[in-house]
């Protein structure tokens, strides 16, 4: 059997022992495209979509635990109430067909610089739970994705869960693309306000080799916000946008120029903040 | 139309059984990298699902996998074993058209027809899940189904015609 | 123009039943069930799969090529390259300058170098990739302006054509002058059905090819030359075709598949992936255009000057005809008493360009309509009023000197379009999906500015410049199995989705009064139908069917007259009955057919045209069609994102033979115009295609396409069957210009290039 279809996590590790060169298959929206185009010819495959431990999500008081096999459609339709920024991002991933198959874990494993949900997960300080046969390790998302399509995931390791803190405060998602559906972002951002922690988190994507947090902008605005009223002076909002721009080192490619990306970051970061603040 | 030829030099083959439109269909000695779309079209005699892009960007290969709308080009065929696969060929009984198919014909929504099977499957899926979907919901639901011929106008008209007819039928 | 000579029974005054009604497509039910066989669905026992090896370089010399690694792979049956060819090594629509396989040099990114036949498409693909090719990479010639004088990159030189138009007094000047430089990017036809077909070797040493294409006979002739076979031994049948839009007028996999079939003596199927498709067909010519318009102070055009360079890419394709159309229609549908136009179609190492819906008129319409808006602003005139003041009319002269003999309801199109209702203003609480950026949630209603823009365009219908354009139809009338009259219509007309099969049925029904009509598969067993392009098939193939039916009708009348001991002139065919003129006696069609089937084959040629002379003067076109477009857009100027809210159009269609089909063609054509305006471009980097996939070559989705409001001007065109004009291209000619004009109004920016990118709006000071 060169295509293993385990239903438990231990079954996954058994299969990986038997098929050490196997490619992991979640939703197929990345792997199959590469196979169809002849860029990858897997000698074996371990399919994950039946694995019980990877399915479903749990909404807890302080976090939402997503099985790595949770699809973007589930996030979009079921979790808008508890993770509004991530649900908004989910709505823009690929197409309805892609959202029904593509998984949160798969997206992290692919680690595309343009992954729509990744900046939101980064803004929320999501933790990735990596499981191996003999245990697991938990890493912040920012430590899992290390570069363009590069992760620290080792052979024999599987993303088991993504644990997403629930923050009390407005969340925004903005994605710039030249078409209203099925588009890779030119620039994408997720902003989350943590009222209890008195912080603003800004995750940005498509502007660097991996999703990043605009930490200077975050630190600055946290100090400028009136946390009782959740307001900030307009020039502070503008400065926030500038600092967000300065955090990025975008490239020019067939989707957009570096100059436009930098400009767009400033605009979306500013708008995201404006929408989060009281009038 | 099935081909049982091994893929020659490539030894990574698999045998499995797919449940397609309610019938068990065995697949033997198929290269493991074959997509569900490829197997449906080239091994199982079901070329209704189309191959306009094979990268999940056009929707012409849309099928229902365990009742969920997916792009069959992005499903590993061997991984679809044990699941229920519904293709455009399985939507209507032999010789008949569903009301959605009928509406597409009547409203002029069919030109070259290459996008049509995927559209039909997607719209059936939408109306099953959300019978009262409005036009904006329709547009979003078929935003993954590219059409190059029609500009979608007659597709929207077909959708409205089906909804009206279903509303009439239920009163 | 002079009407072609036809029998007098042609100009019957009675409205033909069935024509003018929205008869449903006969192939639609099968298409909705997934049972319609497209060219990529073909299968035959024992068939092999073909794959192509293509050059990764835009310009290179092939130092060596070794197929051995490919042949060593199990399941590979054949590898062919230029060295294996035994017939003509080149092909082409106008000039045979395009190699079947690269011959020592490659001239564009994606040029075919070899082809492989194998048991499984995956093996074929791997084998093609295993062929060892050693390239000496060269600097590509990618600048179309430089190409005019650069050292030739092909023995035939770099200039496909320089067309000069000198009309009236080229030195005439006006009191008000506006000029501008414009640019149109490379659009792709992006038909959904991939290039595909099945070649089957025949016992007689020939080959049968089932293929998706636009012109069976021209394909056949090129294939036969390359296979060194007489034409009769190369038999083509049209397979289900998933769109074309010009992209199938040139050959793609046809010769390769036939070669592999003959070499392996097995059926060979080839299906391009979407990625390969972007390399496998010609694209729309990118163009740079300079214009200078002169007008009187009260808004009458005095003169138009233009110089334009169209980048034809590596091989000629139909570039000489594209630049001809572009120049002939350069100023747009306005009366211009003086003109000086220089149009260059050049060869570069960019991907080859050829026919795409609109065929040169799209590029010039974009520039010319931008100029008209500029002129209106300079004159302080309303842009629509300026267009009305200069609109062409019947009997006006074009800048090619040709007097418009057919209908030219330009002013009617403009006013009708202007008067179509505008959409509702953007609501403050409009849902995100209705705003620019859509589900990307980039804009709130307050971030958005609305603009309205107008553009008018025109182009020729049918082929031009002296080309003997014709179509052939064979009509057979006999008693069918149910003892009912059955008409069989056989043409080589490529149905690519436009709905010809429906109109063909309608015409036969109308002409013969017959209910049962079968449209046979298109193949080369009947004479050429010409290309499915130039919006010509309803007119040309429709005309051929009409003529053949007329001939069949004559025999019917003779038989009925014989029966009743009358003269044929005493009888008419009405509603399926052969009746005497006074209605006193009749013979049924069934009875008239008992003596046996009646068959007639006829060619319909449109009125002759002339080549353009050295000053670009001549009666080069047969019939013209006009359309006006108005676009409403919402723009988020800070981010440069655009939502097209509505496109309204009034189109000159002569006569609607099938209203539902006309509606669909206009909506589809406008979708392609919108695509060129805001999202579609093949991005090139030193000749390399950066975006050969639907991931980054963006077609409008159902969330991008606005409602289309359309109205038709029906002034029957004399000399066109039933007075109907082709409708496919005008929607694409000026819809792009209207959308960009609307964005200009919303942003105040000049926007000289399409597609308009967010940068162009958001970063321009």
Image (cartoon, helix red, strand yellow):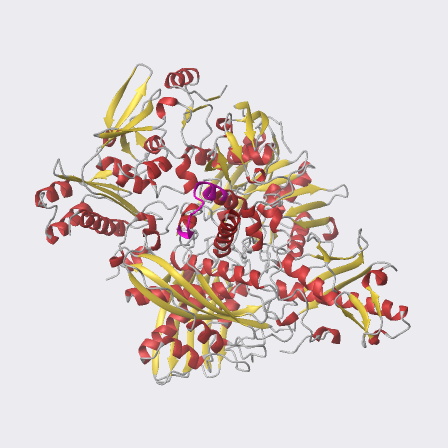
* Above or below, comparing residue C679 to residue A54 in the picture: below
* Above or below, comparing residue C752 to residue B122 in the picture: below
Could you tell me which quadrant the N terminus of chain C lies in? Answer: bottom right
Can residue A114 be seen in the rendering of this structure? no
Say left or right for A219 vs C510.
Answer: left
Say left or right for B44 vs C389.
Answer: right
Can residue A215 be seen in the rendering of this structure? yes
Q: Residue C238: x, y in percent?
A: 65, 50
Q: Residue C568: x, y in percent?
A: 84, 73
Say left or right for C173 vs C27.
Answer: left
> Residue placed farthest to the front in the image?
B171
* Above or below, comparing residue C494 to residue C289 in the picture: above
- Residue B128 in the magenta stretch? The answer is yes
- Residue C562 in the magenta stretch? The answer is no
Q: Quadrant of residue C637?
A: bottom left
Q: Nearer the viewer, residue C726 or C478?
A: C478
Q: Residue C623: x, y in percent?
A: 58, 72
Q: Nearer the viewer, residue C427 or C314?
A: C427
Q: Nearer the viewer, residue C680 or C91?
A: C680
Q: Residue A133: x, y in percent?
A: 33, 15
Report the number of discs. Answer: 0
Q: Main secondary structure of the magenta part?
A: helix
Could you tell me which quadrant the C terminus of chain C lies in? Answer: bottom left
| Bounds of the magenta segment | B124-136
Q: Quadrant of residue C659?
A: bottom right
């Amino acid at each position: 059997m060169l295509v293993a279809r385990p239903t438990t996590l231990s079954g996954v590790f058994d299969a990986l022992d038997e098929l050490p060169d196997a490619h992991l298959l979640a939703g197929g929206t990345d792997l199959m495209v590469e196979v169809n185009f002849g860029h990858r010819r897997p000698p074996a495959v371990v399919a994950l979509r039946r694995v019980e431990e990877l399915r479903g999500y749990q909404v807890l008081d302080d976090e939402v635990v997503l099985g790595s096999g949770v699809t973007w459609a589930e996030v979009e339709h079921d979790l808008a109430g508890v993770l509004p920024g991530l649900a908004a991002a989910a709505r823009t991933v690929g197409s309805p067909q892609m959202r029904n198959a593509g998984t949160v874990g798969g997206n992290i494993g692919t680690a595309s610089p343009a992954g729509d949900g990744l900046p939101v997960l980064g803004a929320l300080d999501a933790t990735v739970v990596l499981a191996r046969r003999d245990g697991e390790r938990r890493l912040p998302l920012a430590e899992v994705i290390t570069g363009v399509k590069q992760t620290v995931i080792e052979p024999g390791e599987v993303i088991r869960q993504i644990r997403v803190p629930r923050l009390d405060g407005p969340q925004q998602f903005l994605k710039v693309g030249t078409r209203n559906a099925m588009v890779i972002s030119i620039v994408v951002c997720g902003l989350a306000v943590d009222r209890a922690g008195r912080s603003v988190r800004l995750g940005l994507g498509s502007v660097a080799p991996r999703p990043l947090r605009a930490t200077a902008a975050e630190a600055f605005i946290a100090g400028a916000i009136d946390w009782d009223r959740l307001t900030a002076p307009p020039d502070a909002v503008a400065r926030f946008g500038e600092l967000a721009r300065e955090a990025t080192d975008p490239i020019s490619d067939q989707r957009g120029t570096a100059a436009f990306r930098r400009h767009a970051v400033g605009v979306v970061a500013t708008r995201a903040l404006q929408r989060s603040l009281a009038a | 139309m099935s081909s049982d030829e091994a893929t020659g030099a490539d030894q990574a083959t698999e045998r499995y059984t797919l449940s397609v439109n309610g019938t068990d269909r065995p697949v033997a000695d198929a290269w493991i990298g074959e997509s569900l779309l490829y197997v449906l079209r080239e091994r199982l005699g079901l070329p209704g699902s189309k191959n306009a892009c094979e990268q999940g960007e056009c929707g012409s290969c849309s099928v229902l996998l365990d009742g969920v709308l997916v792009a069959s080009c992005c499903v590993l065929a061997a991984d679809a074993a044990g699941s229920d696969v519904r293709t455009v060929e399985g939507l209507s009984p032999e010789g008949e058209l569903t009301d959605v198919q009928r509406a597409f014909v009547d409203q002029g929504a069919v030109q070259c027809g290459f996008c049509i099977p995927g559209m039909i499957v997607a719209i059936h899926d939408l109306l099953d899940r959300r019978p009262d979907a409005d036009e904006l919901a329709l547009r979003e639901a078929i935003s993954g189904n590219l059409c190059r011929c029609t500009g979608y106008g007659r597709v929207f008209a077909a959708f409205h015609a089906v909804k009206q007819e279903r509303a009439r039928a239920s009163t | 123009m002079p009407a072609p000579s036809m029998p007098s029974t042609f100009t019957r005054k009675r409205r033909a039943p069935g024509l003018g009604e929205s008869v449903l497509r006969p192939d639609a039910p099968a298409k909705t069930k997934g049972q319609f066989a497209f060219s990529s669905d073909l299968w035959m026992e024992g068939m092999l799969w073909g794959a192509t090896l293509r050059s990764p370089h835009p310009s290179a010399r092939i130092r060596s090529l070794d197929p051995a690694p490919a042949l060593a792979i199990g399941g590979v049956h054949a590898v062919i390259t230029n060295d294996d060819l035994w017939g003509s090594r080149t092909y082409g629509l106008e000039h045979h300058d395009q190699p079947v396989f690269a011959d020592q040099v490659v001239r564009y990114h994606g040029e075919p170098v070899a082809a492989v036949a194998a048991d499984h498409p995956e093996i074929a693909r791997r084998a093609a990739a295993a062929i060892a090719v050693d390239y000496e990479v060269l600097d590509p010639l990618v600048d179309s302006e430089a190409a005019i004088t650069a050292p030739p990159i092909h023995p035939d030189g770099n200039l496909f054509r320089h067309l000069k138009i000198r009309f009236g007094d080229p030195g005439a000047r006006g009191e008000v002058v506006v000029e501008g430089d414009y640019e149109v990017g490379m659009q792709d036809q992006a038909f959904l059905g991939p290039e595909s077909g099945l070649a089957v070797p025949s016992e007689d040493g020939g080959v049968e090819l089932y293929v998706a294409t636009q012109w069976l006979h021209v394909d056949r002739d090129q294939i036969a030359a390359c296979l060194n076979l007489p034409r009769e031994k190369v038999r083509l049948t049209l397979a289900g075709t998933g769109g074309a839009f010009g992209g199938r007028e040139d050959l793609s996999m046809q010769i390769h598949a036939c070669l592999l079939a003959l070499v392996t003596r097995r059926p060979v199927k080839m299906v391009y992936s979407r990625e390969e498709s972007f390399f496998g067909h010609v694209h729309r010519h990118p163009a740079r255009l300079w214009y200078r318009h002169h007008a009187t102070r009260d808004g009458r055009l005095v003169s138009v000057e233009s110089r334009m360079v169209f980048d034809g890419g590596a091989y000629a394709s139909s570039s000489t005809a594209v630049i001809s159309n572009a120049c002939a229609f350069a100023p747009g549908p306005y009366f211009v008493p003086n003109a000086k136009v220089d149009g260059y179609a050049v060869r570069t190492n960019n991907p080859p360009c050829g026919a795409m819906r609109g065929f040169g008129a799209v590029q010039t319409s974009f520039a010319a309509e931008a100029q008209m808006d500029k002129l209106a602003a300079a004159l302080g005139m309303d842009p629509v009023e300026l267009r009305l003041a200069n609109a062409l009319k019947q009997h006006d002269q074009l800048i090619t000197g040709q007097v418009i003999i057919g209908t030219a309801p330009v002013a009617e199109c403009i006013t009708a379009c202007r008067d179509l209702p505008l959409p509702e203003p953007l609501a403050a609480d409009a849902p995100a999906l209705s705003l620019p950026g859509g589900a990307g949630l980039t804009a709130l209603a307050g971030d958005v500015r609305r603009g309205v823009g107008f553009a008018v365009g025109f182009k020729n219908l049918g082929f031009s410049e002296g080309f003997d354009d014709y179509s052939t139809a064979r009509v057979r009338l006999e008693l069918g199995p149910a003892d009912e009259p059955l008409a069989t219509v056989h043409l080589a007309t490529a149905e690519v989705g436009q709905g010809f099969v429906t109109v063909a049925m309608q015409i036969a029904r109308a002409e013969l009064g017959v209910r049962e009509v079968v449209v046979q598969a298109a193949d080369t067993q009947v004479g050429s139908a010409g290309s499915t392009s130039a919006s010509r098939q309803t007119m040309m193939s429709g005309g051929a069917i009409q003529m053949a039916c007329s001939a069949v009708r004559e025999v019917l009348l003779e038989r009925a007259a014989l029966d009743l001991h009358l003269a044929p002139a005493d009888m008419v065919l009405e509603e399926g009955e052969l009746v005497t003129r006074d209605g006193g006696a009749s013979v049924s069609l069934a009875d008239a057919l008992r003596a046996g089937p009646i068959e007639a084959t006829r060619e319909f040629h449109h009125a002759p045209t002339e080549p353009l002379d050295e000053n670009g003067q001549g009666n080069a076109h047969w019939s013209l069609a006009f359309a006006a477009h108005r676009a409403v857009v919402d723009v988020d100027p800070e981010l440069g994102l655009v939502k097209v809210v509505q496109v309204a159009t009034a189109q000159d269609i002569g006569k609607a033979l099938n209203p539902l089909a006309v509606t669909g063609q206009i909506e589809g054509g406008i979708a392609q115009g919108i695509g060129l305006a805001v999202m579609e471009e093949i991005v090139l980097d030193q000749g390399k295609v950066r975006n050969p996939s639907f991931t980054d070559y963006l077609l409008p989705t159902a969330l991008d396409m606005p409602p289309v409001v359309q109205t038709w001007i029906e002034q029957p065109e004399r000399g066109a069957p039933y007075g109907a004009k082709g409708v496919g291209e005008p929607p694409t000619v000026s819809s792009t210009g209207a959308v960009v004009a609307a964005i200009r109004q919303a942003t105040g920016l000049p926007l000289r290039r399409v597609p308009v990118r967010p940068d162009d709006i958001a970063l321009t000071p």
